[in-house]
Image: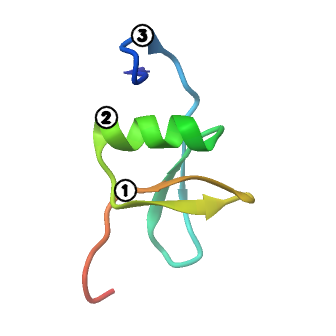
Amino acid sequence: MFRTSNGQPYDTPVKFVIGLSGKCYAVLPNEWEAEDYMKEFGGARLDCLNGFFNGVLLQETLGM
């Protein structure tokens, strides 16, 4: 459970997947929740998964 930008807590289904590049992503239902997730827990950037910018790249490493 994490909080939205207005401070209200809510449950959001988060699915963790390994992308084609071999990197780990947190996939959320839509772009707004992905942005809130990235602000709350951190992340390298938003990426497009399933046709929407709803994937948060959890860790980006150099040289991989």
- Select label 3 or label 1 by which is in front: 3
Image quadrant assignment for residue 36: top left
Q: Position of residue 18 (x, y in %)?
A: 53, 63
Secondary structure under the numbered disc 2 in the rendered image:
helix
Q: Position of residue 50 (x, y in %)?
A: 73, 58
Q: Quadrant of the C terminus?
A: bottom left
Counting other residues with Cα less than 10 Å from the Cα at mark 3, is it few (<14), some (14-19), or many (20 or more)?
few
Q: Are marks 3 and 1 in contact (CB under 8 Å)?
A: no
Q: Position of residue 37 (x, y in %)?
A: 42, 37
Real-space Cα separation, disc 2 to disc 3, in angstroms? 13 Å
Position of 24 with respect to 49 (left or right) is left
Real-space Cα separation, disc 1 to disc 2, in angstroms? 12 Å
Q: Residue at x 31, y 34 (%)?
A: 40
| Image vertical order of residue 19 relative to residue 54, above or below | below
Write down the residue under mark 2.
40
Outermost residue toward the right in this view: 51
Of mark 1 and mark 2, the one earlier in the sequence is 2
Q: Position of residue 14 (x, y in %)?
A: 54, 36
Q: Amino acid at mark 3?
A: Gln
- Which mark, residue 8? 3
Q: Amino acid at mark 1?
A: Leu
Q: Quadrant of the N terminus?
A: top left
Q: Are marks 1 and 2 in contact (CB under 8 Å)?
A: no
